[in-house]
Image (cartoon, rainbow, N blue to C red):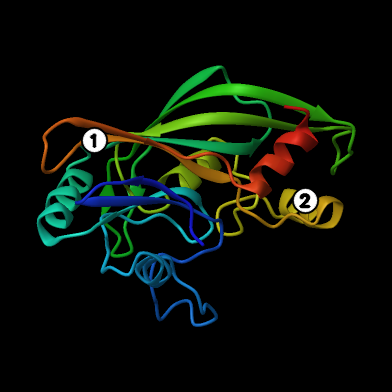
Amino acid sequence: MLEIIYRDEHLIAINKPHGLLVHRSPIAADASEFALQLLRDQIGQKVNPTHRIDRKTGGILLFALNKTAEIAMQQQFMENQVRKKYLAIVRGHTPDQEEIDYPLRKENGTLQDAFTQYTTLKRAELDIALGKHPTSRYSLVEAVPTTGRMHQLRKHFSHIFHPIIGDRTHGCNKQNKLFKETWDMETMLLHASHLEFTHPVTGETAQIDAGLQPEFKRVMQIMGW
């Protein structure tokens, strides 16, 4: 059963587990379960996603229950009118606050502006040697992307040399191996924690928050947070 964290007659949101695809995709033939079909079957009603989050990212996934809400919300996401917050555990000790203004390239080679602001919430240093370092350092950050580029946060944190733990594409292979071998952890530690938007029907401000998934909580305990 999916955790429903928001519902009215127009919209419904779930707290998506890490590793669950939003919908069927030819590039993920290994998957047999999808958020779209699971939610539809759970509530007995057709649902349509209003945005996307990566398969490996956990947290808020918003669906529309009718065409009007679907079109209006997709438009808000496309025009960057939705305020999004994410939590991530990254390699190293990040600055207290930083703005990442680094354009990202689309698949066709076109460069797009991409902007992320983040705040460091916690830092940890574990007594585990890795490479030439006698200890391993990590940070918990809250990231606010003001543009919605593909894999934006993953690419931005990699760009500043603080990759997200568990990110196999843009992350650090040594860290990912350490987490797998030491704690049997392969989850990408990125969580969509907060959405704020204008309700497409009432016009009022709507806010949705999602609690951390068990895998993310387990690493928080490992870090002593």
Up-down relation of residue 177 to residue 148 (above or below):
below
Q: Residue at x 36, y 50 (%)?
A: 13
CA neighbours of label 1 inside 10 A, class few (<14), some (14 to 19), many (20+)? some
Label 2 environment density (alpha carbons within 10 Å; few <14, some 14–19, many ≥20):
some
Query: What residue appears at the point 34 percent right and 69 percent down from the top-left corner?
Result: 40
In the foreground, 114 or 198: 198
Residue 140 image position (x, y, % from top left): 62, 30
Q: Residue at x 13, y 43 (%)?
A: 200
Residue 62 image label: none
Q: Secondary structure at mark 2?
A: helix
Callout 2, which amino acid?
A: Phe
Q: Quadrant of residue 204?
A: top left
Residue 223 vs residue 18: left or right?
right
Q: Which quarter of the figure is the C terminus placed in? A: top right
- Whether residues under marks 2 and 1 lie with C-beta atoms below 8 angstroms apart, the answer is no
Choose mark 2 or mark 1, whichever is in front. 1
Q: Which mark is residue 179?
A: 2
Q: Is 140 left or right of 52, judged from the image as shown? A: right
Identify the residue at image location x=76%, y=32%: 223
- Amino acid on which disc 1 is placed: Phe
Residue 11 vertical placement versus 147 (above, below)? below
- Label 2 to label 1, Cα distance in Å? 36 Å
Spot occupied by residue 97 in the image (x, y as percentages of width and height)? 50, 19
Q: Is residue 165 left or right of residue 3?
A: right
Query: Which mark identifies residue 197?
Result: 1
Quadrant of residue 51 in the image? bottom left
Of mark 2 and mark 1, the one earlier in the sequence is: 2
Residue 88 left/right relative to 27:
right
Q: Secondary structure at mark 1?
A: strand
